[in-house]
């Protein structure tokens, strides 16, 4: 960033501060009366006396690792029957199970006016500077993944997902479209500039091979051709570049003030623009523009924070979990509870006729394929039975698939070592494995080794690629790991299922182009030979295990098809148009995991969530590239390198949040000391090691992608509707 840019930025910040100061030092009588009324009507703090049967509301401040907190600990600590329907996109108390006592949401404190009187509120705080940066990065990443979508597909994706989509979750429902629109404007300007300058749209130009009916890319300077466009060759500054609104501009926008700045304080006060209280808009204006009202409201927020049962910190996540367990009386050594698949729930209106006859032609129930009459009661029994079978298969696959992947990784390393030896001896590289019909090769990261040959003539010959082992039970992922840890919150397209108490399988990303596939054998000179048998130390074991995994996956997929058939009937009526409150069709004992303690599950789940979020981030910007093939990526190192002026400005814009965060640190420290003294503080098990991780049970629902690395098509169900109007 140039000195001139910083001078402009400082001038804008100074003017903004002067304008704000003018409003702060000249309070209005209206604000004083509004705050008086607020303190009278909403100033009370929820403090139930009996914790054993209290309703637990986790007030989830965005970008605080709250999803890990909620999913990996709170949900695993409570039986399925006690979990209310997830409410990230809209409140679903009316369709939650009767007697549910745990709710997590981005709703602010105003939601407590709709909750039972015996409600306990817990929350998680984070350094405001880091939280603002994380929000900026996350919104850009989600928007970048959808930059190639046209508007119709973009908004259709947001509204037609079985699972709660990030685009329906506040505040991302506003920020992501805003950044996407900003990116589109920037890209249009850059393309126009490139056209005027007569520059190429990219170093790699796109061409179409009519004979093979597919696109390839050619680089004139390198005289190379590849099937898939290589990654960007030049990285630009992630917080100040021509592709997106720079950070120092964005923090001054109305969107940032309305949705992110002072976010923790406003959520604790119940005064966000997502509030259930009618006076929230006027009070929020007073909070920002009237000094006396601002101080009074911050004092209310501090008192309210002190009244909460538990306040955790993102920076001290493990001790926060241990403190919460002590506060709620959860035993970290007791067994954990698995997630309940949506197929275990029904939403019946009073007087619903369970003997109503429907027709059913699921392949496993009616092998002949004929339509058979069956009552809804019988069909529901089958649905539960099939789901139990699918869960059992997923449990087996959850053990076998990691074993298979570990073996293939070992073989991959061995192959690479053998390749290097042969290259040194001038013998060429090793060949790929041919598996049987049941093991059609798909490719997986780390198993596909690409070589790009120089093509001496035009038109270019499409370059062949070499492959090592691939497996029918594995599929490639283009994700990886970045340095911005603790940002595993609000995973894009992976919020909660709309059904009561369920967890959501990942919806996955867009289908990738084939990788590692060259032209047909013998088409061009230099074509590599077809795969030959690999005589590795693990060859027989891999082929046997691959066949076993593939067989189990096929069985699971057959069950899943029957489940989809049942769900397509008037069997259950789930959100967004339920007939009545959720009803769990099987006992809670069905989901008890007596082999995995609550503490062990938290360790495994939090590690997995962090890796999953990091994996998603690595490929986020592949489509957000300048005409000159420049892109960017976020990292903790780039955060640390931010200019102090920008960091200070974020602190100024989040002064109240800094006070709240400091108080949160104090409250957590005091709680830990007190809990240690009365011996209620328990130790979490040590962090999960690679070997120990295999022993943790992680069963995922079968109605989406299971724990299998190999993905299967996902059923399309009714989607939840957005719960709030757009700004």
Image (cartoon, rainbow, N blue to C red):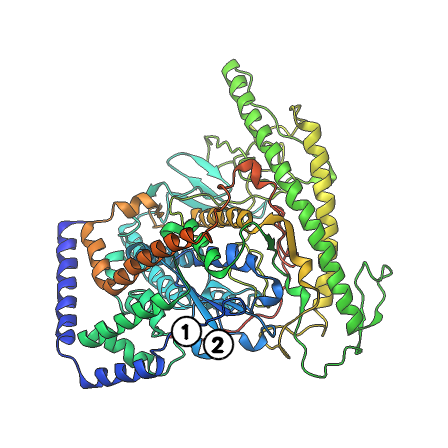
**Residue toward you, 265 or 163:** 265
Residue 173 position by quadrant: bottom left
Left or right relative to 575: residue 572: right
Above or below, comparing residue 252 to residue 39 in the picture: above
Outermost residue to the front: 678
Mark 2 vs mark 1: in front: 1
The residue indicated by pointer 1 is: 46
Earlier residue among tags 2 and 1: 1
Q: Tell which of 76 and 567 is nearer to you.
A: 76
Q: How many marks?
A: 2
- Category of crowding for the residue at label 2, using alpha-carbon neighbours closer than 10 angstroms: few (below 14), some (14–19), many (at least 20): some
Task: Look at the image and tell me whether residue 523 can be seen.
Answer: no
The residue carrying mark 2 is 115
Helix, strand or loop under label 2: loop
Q: Are marks 2 and 1 in contact (CB under 8 Å)?
A: yes
Residue 189 position within the rendered picture, expressed as x and y whole percent measured from the top left: 30, 59
x, y percent for residue 1: 20, 49
Q: Position of residue 321 (x, y in %)?
A: 45, 54
Quadrant including the C terminus: bottom left
Query: Which residue is pictured at 34% across the width and 70% down the height?
Result: 304
């Amino acid at each position: 960033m140039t000195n001139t840019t910083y001078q402009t930025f400082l001038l804008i910040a100074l003017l903004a501060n002067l304008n704000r100061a003018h409003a702060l030092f000249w309070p209005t009588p209206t604000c004083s009366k509004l705050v008086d009324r607020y303190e009278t009507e909403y100033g009370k703090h929820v403090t139930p006396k009996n914790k054993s049967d209290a309703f637990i509301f986790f007030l989830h401040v965005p970008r605080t690792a709250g999803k890990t907190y909620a999913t990996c600990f709170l949900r695993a600590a409570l039986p399925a029957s006690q979990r209310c329907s997830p409410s990230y996109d809209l409140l679903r108390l009316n369709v939650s199970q009767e007697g549910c006592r745990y709710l997590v949401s981005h709703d602010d404190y105003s939601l407590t006016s709709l909750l039972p009187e015996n409600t306990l509120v817990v929350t998680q705080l984070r350094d405001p500077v880091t939280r603002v940066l994380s929000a900026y990065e996350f919104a850009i990443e989600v928007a970048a993944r959808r930059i190639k979508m046209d508007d119709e597909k973009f908004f259709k994706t947001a509204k037609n997902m079985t699972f709660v989509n990030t685009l329906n979750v506040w505040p991302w429902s506003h920020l992501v479209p805003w950044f996407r629109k900003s990116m589109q404007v920037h890209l249009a300007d850059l393309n126009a500039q490139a056209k005027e300058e007569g520059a190429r749209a990219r170093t790699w130009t796109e061409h179409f091979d009519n004979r093979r009916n597919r696109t390839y890319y050619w680089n004139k300077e390198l005289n190379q051709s590849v099937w898939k466009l290589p990654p960007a060759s030049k990285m630009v500054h992630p917080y100040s570049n021509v592709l997106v609104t720079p950070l120092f501009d964005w923090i001054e926008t109305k969107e940032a003030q309305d949705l992110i700045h002072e976010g923790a304080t406003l959520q604790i006060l119940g005064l966000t623009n997502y509030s259930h209280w009618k006076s929230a808009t006027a009070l929020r204006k007073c909070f920002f523009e009237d000094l006396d009202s601002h101080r009074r409201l911050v004092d209310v927020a501090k008192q309210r924070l002190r009244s909460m049962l538990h306040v955790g910190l993102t920076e001290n996540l493990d001790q926060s979990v241990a403190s919460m367990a002590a506060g709620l009386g959860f035993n970290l050594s007791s067994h954990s509870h698995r997630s309940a698949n949506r197929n275990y729930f029904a939403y019946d209106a009073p007087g619903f006729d369970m003997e109503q006859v429907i027709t059913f032609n699921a392949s496993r129930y009616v092998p002949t394929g004929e339509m058979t009459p069956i009552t809804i009661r019988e069909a529901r029994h089958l649905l539960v039975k099939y789901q139990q079978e699918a869960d059992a298969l997923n449990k087996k696959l959850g053990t076998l698939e990691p074993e298979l992947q570990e073996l293939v990784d070992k073989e991959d390393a061995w192959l690479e070592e053998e390749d290097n030896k042969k290259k040194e001896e001038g013998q060429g590289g090793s060949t790929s494995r041919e598996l049987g019909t049941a093991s059609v090769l798909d490719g997986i990261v780390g198993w596909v080794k690409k070589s790009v040959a120089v093509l001496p003539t035009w038109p270019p010959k499409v370059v062949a690629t070499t492959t090592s082992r691939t497996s029918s039970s594995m599929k490639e992922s283009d994700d990886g790991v970045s340095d911005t840890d603790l940002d595993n919150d609000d995973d894009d397209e992976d919020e909660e299922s709309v059904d009561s108490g369920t967890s959501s399988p990942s919806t996955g990303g867009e289908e990738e182009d084939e990788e590692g596939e060259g032209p047909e054998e013998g088409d061009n000179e230099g074509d590599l030979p077809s795969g030959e048998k690999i005589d590795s130390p693990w060859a027989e074991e891999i082929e046997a295990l691959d066949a076993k995994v593939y067989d189990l996956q096929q069985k699971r997929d057959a069950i899943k098809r029957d489940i989809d058939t049942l769900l397509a009937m008037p069997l259950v009526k789930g959100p967004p148009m339920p007939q009545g409150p959720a009803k769990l069709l099987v006992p809670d004992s069905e989901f008890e995991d007596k082999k995995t303690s609550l503490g062990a599950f938290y360790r495994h789940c939090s590690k997995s969530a962090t890796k999953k979020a990091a994996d998603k981030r690595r490929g986020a910007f592949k489509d957000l590239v300048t005409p000159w093939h420049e892109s960017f990526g976020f990292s903790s190192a780039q955060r640390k390198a931010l200019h102090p002026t920008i960091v200070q400005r974020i602190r100024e814009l989040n002064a109240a949040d800094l006070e709240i965060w400091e108080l949160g640190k104090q409250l957590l420290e005091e709680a830990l000391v007190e809990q240690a003294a009365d011996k209620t503080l328990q130790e979490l098990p040590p962090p999960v090691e690679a070997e120990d991780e295999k022993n943790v049970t992680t069963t995922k629902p079968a109605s989406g992608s299971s724990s299998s690395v190999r993905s299967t098509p996902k059923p399309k169900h009714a989607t939840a509707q957005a719960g709030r109007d757009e700004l």
